[in-house]
Amino acid sequence: MRRRELNERSPVRLLESSLHGGVGGGNIAAVIARHGVGKTAFLVGVALDDLMRGRKVLHVSLEESSERVRSFYDEVFSDLAHERELEDVWKVRLEMERNRRIHCYLGDTFTVRKLRETIQFLRDHGDFHPVAIMLDGFPFDETTPEEIDEIRAIVKDIDAELWMTAVTHRESDADESGYPEPLTHVADKLDVILQMAHDTKAVHITLLKDHDNPNVSDLRLALDPTTMLLKKE
Amino acid sequence: MISDLTKVRNIGISAHIDSGKTTLSERILFYTQRIRKIHDVKGKDGVGATMDSMELERERGITIASAATYCEWDSHHINIIDTPGHVDFTIEVERSLRVLDGAVLVLCAVAGVQSQSLTVDRQMRRYKVPRLAFVNKCDRSGANPYRVTEELKDKLKLNAVMMQLPIGLEADHVGVVDLVQMKAFYFEGENGEIIREGAIPDNMLEAAEEKRTELIEAASMFNDELLEAALEETVTSEQIHAAVRRGVLELGLTPVFCGSAYKNKGVQPLLDAVVRYLPNPTDIENVALNLEKGEEEFAVKVDPNEPLIALAFKLDEGRFGQLTYLRIYQGTLNKGDTIYNTRLNRDVRVGRLVRMHSDEMEDIDGTSAGDIVALFGIDCGTGDTFTSNRNAFAMSSMHVPEPVIHIAIKAKDRKAEANLAKALARFAKEDPTFRSHVDPESAETIVSGMGELHLDVYIERMKREYKAEVETGKPQVAYREAISRRADFNYTHKKQTGGSGQYGRVAGYMEPYDGGEFEFLNEIRGGAIPTEYIPAVEKGFQAAMEKGKMIGFPVTGLRVCINDGAAHAVDSSDMAFKSAGRGAFVEVYGKCKPQILEPIMRVAVEGPGEFQGAFVRSVMQRRGVIVGTTESEGFVRVDADVPLSEMFGYSTDLRSSTQGKAEYTMEFVKYAPVPAEVSEELIKKYRQDGES
């Protein structure tokens, strides 16, 4: 299978058509789920969609070591390459690795200022201009609307999409605004909110917020839990 | 003979180069009364630590070869394998890990988890070695065992839990608080041999209570009894010990101890912990391969009454002569037995059996499963398996990477030449990643290994141990060639000279093969080539593969299939078909789009955060691909895949650009095609060299 076809089966395609014009540069999407549903794998899937099209992605992790993040990419990539019988696997992988940067902040060392510096650093030293940033493990329960504004300013400056993950808890499903904890206090600062849940067969994605559209399309995706690609019917 | 296997521990001490591992080993031998006097690494008395048996190691203050030594503690029999810390010698580390049942991971209380600790830890994970951590050098300025414990959690993702608290740090470090017994221990006397028990200092009580709660919480995950006792507040020391031991064996818990080997603090409690928490040989399951049943795996039984299975994991030629270190996995080995080397299909008589204590030894009459001993004067290679009753068993084959670097060497004089041959034969047997051959064209001796330092050490050893002084050429990267697409061939070898001629025709195809170096398929139907000539065709291809047509490096990952051909009743011969195979290869090689492959190293550079820019630049300048950046508390680590050819002189550059504050490690990861411009350059150079 050629790369283009592979991309056509990415959930991102369907998301883009359901969302009004995708997430969009300078905007923020948050993926919310309980522990262990596969948020990181989903983010990696989104990142791979860009990477396979030769675009650059920065993956920032606050929880995992860079080796672990790498192995996430390697796993999702090889399952994907295998399942879709990708040609030239070797070359595609190298290109993917060249277009990807992994940056990890361990032991609570992450700050928004550091994120700005890292992005600046990559532009200055590596001529690296990401179209998307994956921010995994951001502590939403400790953040403020002002901090989200700061983050938005960063991605606006470089016109990149930002994808973040949030962990939700069993007890708190949704408040009256319709958004689950810990996103309630910053939900209006986020452009897109997706919720993930899984059963024994698949991972299900529901769209909770779509920019400022009052009519959120009734999107329901079922993904294969290993490849994070759309389930084959 | 060992009567009770539960009283045996085979452990390794594994760590970063400067974390004081050798000093710790030395202290262990002292407290277990194997040595009467303490020497230090690079000691002023010129004796050096007992474990570093090679002269060179003494001089450089590093441990190169893993000497096995044994000692007794609390009526337990402990075999210690001193593992080298430098990544260039990882084959040694990996080999030792195979024969260990448990390990002590030594960390520096100041530097904490460094890139080398990461490599070593990765290897321990690979071989599933249960481990304890010892935070050494608590007497140094800047020591912080609490931070190091956090790093074990963050960077190594270990479930690290403190078993002790240090009493005083830096110059005030005098002892430890045992969180299980809730007592303080002070180490006194000239060599810390007097242990004084006391109450926990008042100012530490609160911290000790808190850390003890953490310890019990973590340990109770592995034992329901402890969990219940914790709820009812009736916890006993035995319950904690049992739970921690379970956690360690399941690789789910890493207990952390602290002290200072150099200042003689905390070593004895560490020995207690080794005995208490690390597994005995019966706790570990090992598998062997049955060579007669297509390498079918089976579990070995740690039982002296079963047939013998033993693995030669290290060869050593010291002042006593040639020694082979053996780990006995199953059965019994006695002096005078005849045992069978399954690789060489050869019987060997056990003349002398010894237990090694660094470079001294004692004769023993016999021993059994679970033990580590040494044999005298046995001819074998590292990794060979010995059995009784000529059983064709092998311990699972060890992963041996291909060498990635070559250096041409030349003996300085005639006498050195004879010694050199001896040295090379010896080293190749000791270390499967060290190889040597004579280049047929230049008549130079080429040695190959896993890195510059790896080869440097052997060149030094040639001089010191074998009096073979050599001149060395520039290090050369071990390139490979590989084809990237399939192409058909149909080649006729024909020669008509005076007497009988030569004739052979072969046809088929060549294609990339990712299952190994070479595969040969014979799909000839109807005897177009008589069967007896087929092996000659295969040999012809293999001979041609030794020197690729692009830059003269070996060709790898190749499948050849022959499906047609022709022979002549009189003029065909083995010779003719070998030439036909070789000719076919030469004819078709260019059509298969060959490419040059180079070894890629995984480089990890680590240092203070302000050097992040310098690290990234240094890697980018070297055609590196950055695979990740990790920041934590003022430190930054950059991981990158960099071609080996670009890494020469890196340590010097790094030192000068960071004022010596950064360090790096590297490890071979894979072969990958070189970019077009580099490929052209290499080809041009190869042609020029050919002309001159």
Image: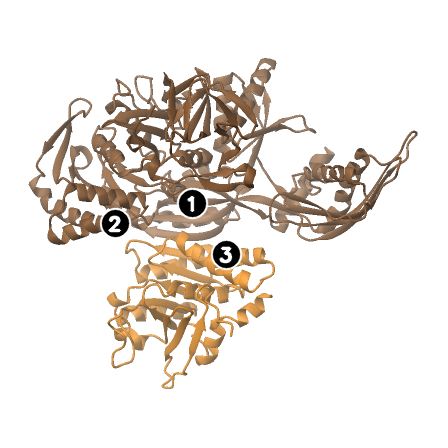
* Chain rendered orange: A
Q: Is residue B410 left or right of residue B528?
A: left
Disc 3 is placed on an element classified as: helix
The amino acid beneath tag 3 is Glu
Disc 1 is placed on an element classified as: strand
Q: Is residue B619 left or right of residue B215?
A: right
Disc 2 is placed on an element classified as: loop
Residue B86 appears in the figure: no
Q: Is residue B175 left or right of residue A75?
A: left
Instruction: Give the residue number, with chain letter if any, for mark 3.
Output: A97
Instruction: Give the residue number, with chain letter if any, for mark 1.
Output: B604
Between disc 3 and disc 2, the foreground one is 2
- The structure residue drawn at horizontal position 54% and vertical position 27%, both measured from the top left corner, is B428
- Tag shown at residue A115: none
Task: Looking at this view, name the residue that lies furthest to the right.
Answer: B498
Residue B435 at x, y percent in the picture:
56, 30
